Image (cartoon, coloured by chain):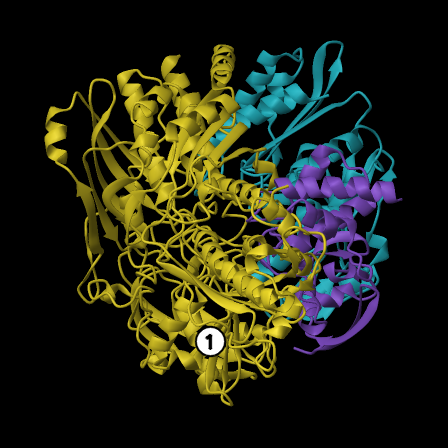
Chain colours: A yellow, B cyan, C purple
Amino acid sequence: MSAGARDSRGTGIGVSVTRLEDRPLVTGRGQFAGDISFTRQLHMRIVRSANAHGLLKNIDVAEAKAVRGVVAVWTASDVADLPPIDFREGPNEKLAPFRQPVLARDRVRYVGEPIAAVFATDPYIAEDAADLVAVEIEELPVIVDAAAPVAEFPGGLTTEATICRQGYGDVDAVFRNAAHIVEIDVAIGRHSGVPLETRGAIGRYDAARDVLELHGAAKVPHRNRESLARMFGRSTAAVHCYEGQVGGGFGIRGEIYPEDILVLLAAMRLGRPVKWLEDRREHMIAANHSRQQRHMIRAAVDAEGRLLGIDDRFFHDQGGYIRTHGTRVAETACGILPGPYRLPNFRVQCHFRLTNKTPAATYRAPGRYETNFVRERLMDAIAKTLGLSRIEVRRRNLLQPADMPHERPLTALGDEVVLDSGDYPGLLNKALTRCAWDKLEREVKARREKGELIGLGLAMYVEKSGLGPTDGVHIHVHDSGDVEVITGGASVGQGFETVIAQVCADKLGVDYRRVRVVHGQTDRIEYGIGAHATRATVMTANATAVAAEKVRAKALDMASQLVQTEPSRLSIIDGHVVRAEAPDAPLMTLGEIASNLRPTSKTRGDREPGLAADGWFNTAHMTYPYGVQIALVTIDRGTGGVNIEKMLIAFDVGRAINPVLVRGQIVGGFAQGLGGALFEEFQYDERGQPLSVTFADYLMPTAHEIPKVDVLITEDAPSATNPLGIKGAGEGGIAGVGAAIASAVDDALGDIATVTALPIKPQWLKAVIDAHAAASA
Amino acid sequence: MKPAPFAYHAPTGLQEALKLLAALAPQDGRILAGGQTLVPTMAFRMARPAHLIDINGIRELDGVSVAGDRLRIGACTRHAYFESDKIPGRLGDLLRKVVRFIAHYPIRQRGTFCGSVANSDPSSEWCCVTAALDGIVVAESERGARRIAAKDFYKAVMTTELRDDEMITAVELPLLVDDTRTGFCEFSRRAGDFGIAMALVTYRLEGSRITDAHVGLGGAEATPRRIAEAEAALSRKEPKSEIFAAAGAAAAAAIDPIDDNNNPTEYRRALVQTLVERALAGAA
Amino acid sequence: MDKIDIVLEINGAVHEATVEPRRTLADVIRDDCGLTGTHIGCEHGVCGACTVLVDGAPVRSCLMFAVQAEHKKIRTVEGLQQGAALHPLQEAFIEHHALQCGFCTPGFLMLAVGLLEQKPHPGDDELLDVLSSNLCRCTGYENILTAVKAAAARMSVGK
């Protein structure tokens, strides 16, 4: 056991302790949004558009208003003073016309768009009344294909909101002279995070304090507080957001949606708390969708299969409006597309298109799940064109450890891409060894000869994490010896409290069970960026380490006065100050030191009151973990069903604070990734009617569909951008799944067909298998 | 997703229930048994019955009994009952095989056999069983009881011979003689989902040749039914893989598959071929 | 529509409520009886977050009306703990990291309790079959399976 481990009773960094979050959750004592209630609260129900595109001719609310228990019914004219929902990063003049109004004005652009809001004393009554709101819509032609020619929405609004362009080098020149040009046209289906807890928001106006409160906040409470203050014209001192337990985030939760604004406005206007809980059908048509893109991508390669340039043009299906993220998903897709390969020339342009579907935004590994699929399909195509093995073509192109840090003149999430550290060939070798790739290849060959449709596939990818620029925490040690870490971070169920407590425990010298982590409460700490972009562990943990070191120094300074010795001769073990030479003889507790530092303490001297400190961590760039995924699949000729026999995910996280939790993130991410690869899809008919509005139609994997996953977590390349060396693990499990499964299914199909779209469905597989058999017969 | 209002009635005897049904059916009254289909439909407000007549408290509708050469399944018998070894013989073996495909464990604790038959979803396993085995649906009203053969019962997607004032009080299935071989095969995207298609087969051997073959399909067409062409392909043949393939092909050729957004008719047709073949090959 | 007075027995305690017949058991357990550990994830019987035991059988409380649950013994996640001692399944879920956001957890616990009380030694296939009844979006299920197996072993030793 290291000294650090001993200090925290073996609960510090690198130890797989159990989670602090779990006890209330397994006993049913959590406070999810639905569990929060205030006396005299009203319940809101949204009337949504049943048409994908049309002009709002008339809304008749008279019958709804007459229902006993209904307090108010609002339409756009009641909220005319509210601006459309703004972008999280602040005003953007170019994209402003595409923002979503809180309630539809004059026109609707997707099924599910909020048209009216009913406020009633009971959710059943609110739903009854909402059914009675009569909406008259004149239907307009519907656009469901983002790659269709650019059109115009009413009001002269183009459907091509913008074109995102990135790139470097002279792409045209290398394509003129390349030995080979390999071109593919591939698409990713529309799917999303779909957390088990639907969204929920409770607005409350506390007139006694003149504070507007949003309960049920998540992900980015501090950022949202600023946006809300802007929208309502209030001081941030008069708006607070409160995060309770969060039933899964995955990108979609915690953004500001129309419903959040409505409960707050209603709380102020109606003078009663207002609660809104999304139902599942609403969730499927109202919460952010994600992923849908079609890429026409080509590579110029030399005679040995080395990439000379990539030229990509893609269509991003944004849906009816641009929401809080602006164009971030598309921009990240552009910036991250080159992945782990050396790419001398690159050009990408994204046609950011509006369609008559639910608006899209981020879903775990946004821009990467998509482009990893696209790029790895391209690498497989290069291998096939040149007759190289899929491993060899990757080896010839991988960036080497000596190339690190590797700067790319690209941006992702507004951040310049600088791959900070990594041994990509090393991880590939480890993964191949771990799954015994050569042996698997022989087995595949033997079984294929016996008639099985069996295939082996792999994908390599670079993830990003730790989005800055900064994060701060405040640590306060109470007289009881309990340590409170107040952060601007947020928990979306990933184990944030545990991990931050472990870091604090490790640096301060306490058992992690003595650490309470406060998150998502804007009235406890002024600033915070929250939990998104796999940033929470990297940013908040490093800030926690800084603050904990300061608290430790202050504690030792105080103790040195009390025991009349040099601070350097003292240490803190398990919450007790000890002499370095007598670690088993505790001198006093951290709580006693905290007492000595009380404002009124006579022993405090001229020290600042309180055993407390702030810590900040700043970073100029993100940090880039990386992974390899390998899949072995079979296809059932009779049904088109895909069975995953083996799955390996190798992922380098720099440094794992809690390996069991890292593994949990990776396996859980894999399950979601498999959903997008084989099952999940928000489908629409040609009239823009959503077809996947129930859990019987939107197919999330169950325990039956998830194979056992072998996870290899490595710590070969600690982050160069933060002192703890951490890289985030939140999105590493999901990011490469579509790519790896496609590669394996493609291998199993052999010359039957090529996989060009996700999800890969049994109906398609059966059709191509049968067509091939008929042609061969 | 809260159901619209309704009046609730909980009769404790069958006659009381039938009387309520006669009175309330014209006012949009419906029977509530397991509720595993009706209640979600009400949650989406696609069903808004004004009255629900809850039959769960009617003792005489519970239970399964053997009457002569038939198994009589009372209206309140839950799916889960068929997981137990209480049902004897080859029929019990077959029903145990099939019940695992019905939704999931908690749904099977509440949902009822007869409720599935009344609902008549094309992909209901029990509808497929009833059709494949030539079951009898017992429908009762204040006007009396009718015994309806399965082949006459299913009319169209979720449409049956049942009249508004009638409820199913039991379904009868013929017991299977001890040397009957049975097989069942279903394909769905995920375990527990509605089957895209399913095949149920039974046959016996006379000497080395197939006799008394039943090939029933569910999910593939608007209603479940026996496929005479497939049965003919098996009749008097030895049980071999070529024969099973021929029966599968005959079934696939004979059907008029339903079409939905994800499953074009050709996919269902191809699945039927596979599933019939596999159900036959797996029959034991 | 007229409201009906009902009496529900939940975790051995009696709860009185006056409800419309249309109110689901899930809503009444949560809103009228204040037991918010039973979660609502889909209201159409697929996700299983609202799973409770009714007379020992795990059922979807979103697919039952509260008026149907009179005179039955209802058990929810709040009833698993005995004093300060967690149920072996609760302990196993913590120990094996079988939850992340925890929203689906009460439903999985009640599903597993219902199964193991009826069948203390389920086979691997049967366990997989039963646990595929509920949806979890965080864990990828592997740790849930591990936890239930571990708890089953512990519970049968304890007997």
Measured as percent of width and height from the top left, residue A537 is found at 48, 52
Measured as percent of width and height from the top left, residue A494 is found at 54, 52
Classify the position of the N terminus of chain A by image quarter: top right
Residue B3 seen by the camera: no
Q: Quadrant of residue A152?
A: bottom left
**Which residue in the structure is indicated by mark 1?**
A240
For this view, does B160 lie left or right of residue A762?
A: right
Please tell me whether residue A504 is drawn above or below residue B261 in the rendered image: below
Please tell me whether residue A479 is drawn above or below residue A168 in the rendered image: below
**Of residues A232 and A428, which is closer to you in this image?**
A428
Q: How many marks?
A: 1
| Residue placed furthest toward the bottom | A208
Measured as percent of width and height from the top left, residue B225 is found at 61, 35
| Residue placed furthest toward the right | C159
Q: Quadrant of residue A496?
A: bottom right
Disc 1 marks a residue whose amino acid type is His
Classify the position of the C terminus of chain A by image quarter: top left
**Of residues A365 and A75, which is closer to you in this image?**
A365
**Of residues A364 and A529, which is closer to you in this image?**
A529
For this view, does A601 lie left or right of residue A249?
A: right
Residue A621 seen by the camera: yes
**Of residues A718 and B102, which is closer to you in this image?**
A718
Measured as percent of width and height from the top left, residue A503 is found at 54, 53
For this view, does A223 lie left or right of residue A37?
A: left
- Residue in the image at 10% along x and 27% along y: A176
What secondary structure is marked by label 1? Answer: strand
Q: Pointer 1: residues within 10 angstroms few (<14), some, or many (20+)?
A: many
- Residue in the image at 74% along x and 35% along y: B95
Label 1 resides on the chain identified as: A
